[in-house]
Amino acid sequence: MTSPFAVRDGFVASAAGPAAHFGNPLGEQRLLARGRAVVELGLGVVTVSGPDRLSWLNSITSQLLLGLAPGVSTETLVLDASGRVEHAARVVDDGETVWLLTEPADAEPLAAWLSSMRFMLRVEVTDRSDALATLGWFDGADPLRGTEPLATWTDPWASVTPGGWGYADQEAHPGSDWTLRIAVVTPDTAAQVAASDVPAAGLLALEALRIAAWRPSLSDVDERTIPHELDWLRSAVHLSKGCYRGQETVAKVHNLGRPPRRLVMLHLDGSDGVVPSPGTPVMLDDTEVGRLVASATHHELGPVGLAVVKRSLDPAAVLTLATDDVVVTAAQQVIVPPGAGATADVPRLPRLGAVRRP
């Protein structure tokens, strides 16, 4: 689908289709953060209808969805049997249909997996990504100007959701100011917004704000990711709901163990004007200790990134990332502390064969 915002001056398309920017990413960030701009997101849209939709989704994903009230926004994960993240979806129910908003490349795989899990239940799964548009904004903006969207999702990231758990410092958490709203609209409505005088921002602006808010995304996930590593128990996992695939790992790591890796924010040295790309190895001296999963230039913080690193890495260590024949140094800001996990008051037993010395 061609972006309706392609009519705007300065439009530069991203690989996914919506605008990456309109010529001034930093200025667009400021407007977006202040609630004065709209951003086309290009998200995947999967709907689930039928009387069994909430109980069914509750039984196969990480969030408590049974009894979810119409209009209440939440988030859920699909995990494999080992607790690793396979899919992530923003969730809102309108009383008849559950709307699942996910990353563009994940819509088709998510819809296919859900369809394979239907069995004899009264549910219908539809991938509607090609027929609908998604627009985002922060508190203060009103890009639809009275037009009713098909669905509206409000990000719950601003606080720890009921049944969740936050590993990061809650008193200084930057997510408290994250007020993202996402509307699912028809292409005609998106075109009307694009033709209006509402300022527009690109995906680069939103990505920088996401990084600064420590907000995890499916784009941060690799084949080993468990939710604890990204502090995703905060918004996408209910720790006391019934069984679902991967629950044993979620409970065991949270109560008795520690995640093997942890998310950190990196403040990157911008002296050479180079921002490393996601996937760049994060090094401590000559040893790889993690990977960069997101990077951008923030309008106040400068070059920043999110990285998943070894749990045991010293939070005070200065790291390096090599890109374009330039070595960029980086300082860590702790998101998931090295000691995160092991919340249960369970006595530590000595190792088998250990000798207790007087």
Image (cartoon, helix red, strand yellow):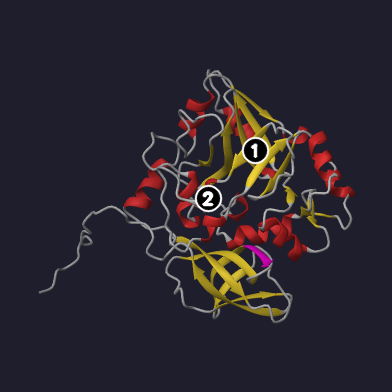
Q: Is residue 208 above or below residue 47?
A: below
Whole-percent x, y for residue 343 in the image: 31, 54
Q: Which residues are magenta?
A: 294-298
Q: Earlier in the sequence, mark 1 or mark 2?
A: 1
Residue, x 79% and y 39% (percent of image)? 190
Q: Is residue 162 left or right of residue 276?
A: left
Residue 348: quarter of image: bottom left
Residue type for callout 1: Pro
Task: Quadrant for the N terminus, please.
Answer: top right
Q: Residue furthest left?
A: 358
* Residue 281: quarter of image: bottom right
* Position of 156 relative to 68 (above/below): below
Vertically, is 50 above or below 35? Answer: above
Give the residue drawn at x 31%, y 53%. 256
Few, some or many residues within 10 Å of mark 2 (<14, 14–19, 20+)? many
Q: Picture coordinates of residue 15 (x, y %)?
A: 78, 53
Nearest to the observer: residue 20 or residue 72: 72
Which quarter of the image is occupied by the C terminus? bottom left
Q: Which mark is residue 157?
A: 2
Q: Amino acid at mark 2?
A: Trp
At 62% from the left edge and 57% from the top edge, which residue is drawn?
210
Q: Is residue 296 magenta?
A: yes
Q: Which residue corresponds to mark 1? A: 109
